[in-house]
Amino acid sequence: MHELGDSPRALRVAVASGLVLRPRRGWVADPALDRHLLFAARHGVVLSCATQAGRLGLWVTEQPARPHVAARSRGDHVDANAEVHWTRPIVLRSPDALVDPLPNMLENVARCQSFEHALATWESALNKGLTDIEALAALRLGPEARRVLELCTPFSDSGLETLFKTRLRWLRVPIRAQIWLHGHRVDFLIGNRLIVQIDGKQHGGDQKVSYYRHDARLELRGYKVIRVGYAQVMHDWPSGQETIMLALAGTMRRAA
């Protein structure tokens, strides 16, 4: 506003010429502003839940078709094509904020998303160092968020790893994540001899060659190594789980 001058006329000229946008009364915005931020400014809400998690680079299993936002208060009328969360914030929001504080966003994720998908987003936040378990435990979280927090660790490098270990919790076999074996880190060691590596969509080229070389070295030392890809975890889990069960049975038979 300093560059435009303080007069209402200068503002009207700037809006008419397209130099700035006027999303709602009392607000001006750069036309290049992130579309989600502009949406929040226009409708008087804050970005939250899966939408804000995605903007922070956290794991989101699927980007929502409509933005997920939070109403500033329960008495607000929100006229927007959005998924609106009406939960009371556990951390106060600034009146001018367009994005929810991280704890509020995580609380809404826990309430809105399935348990395993919420856990993947929470662990992504921990892994990136955006928060820690002690800080979250000190908050007045709801029951859904408390349940997620009970299983959270900061060790999953991707949501695929979170989904994988969550779906195998029923196994009565130790599952250790992100441990070092013979100079390299492996995603999971199930029991004493089965190693499972999770391949994301981005793995390829020289990186894949290095992975295969390390797999061969582990096999020579008596481990069974299998790789589970993105498509198996996300779209064909029964097939991936069957492969793991067969491999685990083989390692247990050899150990007997």
Image: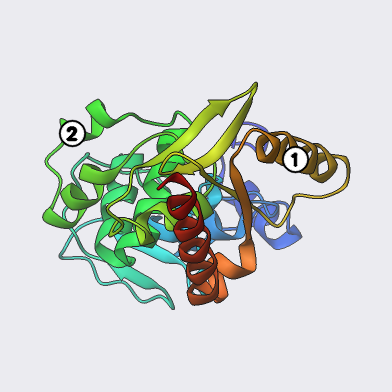
Question: Relative to residue 33, is residue 100 drawn left or right?
Answer: left
Asked if residue 198 can be seen in this view, the reply is: no
Q: Mark 1 highlights which residue?
A: 216
How many angstroms separate mark 1 from mark 2 (CA)? 42 Å
The correct choice, above or below, for 19 with respect to 183 in the image is below
Q: Mark 2 highlights which residue?
A: 137
Q: Residue 232 in the image: state x and y as whole percent.
A: 59, 69
Q: Residue 125 in the image: state x and y as whole percent.
A: 43, 39
The correct choice, above or below, for 115 with respect to 153 in the image is below
Q: Secondary structure at mark 1?
A: helix
Question: Relative to residue 154, is residue 243 drawn left or right?
Answer: right
Badge 1 vs badge 2, beta-carbon distance below 8 Å: no
Name the mark on residue 154.
Answer: none
Give the residue drawn at x 75%, y 59%: 17
- Residue kind at label 1, given as amino acid type: Ala
Q: Toward the viewer: 73 or 176?
A: 176
Dot 2 crowding, Cα within 10 Å, few <14, some 14–19, many 20+: few
Colour option used: rainbow
Q: Toward the viewer: 65 or 200?
A: 200
Q: Nearer the viewer, mark 1 or mark 2?
A: 1
Q: Residue 141 in the image: state x and y as whole percent.
A: 15, 45
Q: Toward the viewer: 44 or 186?
A: 186
Q: Toward the viewer: 141 or 69?
A: 141
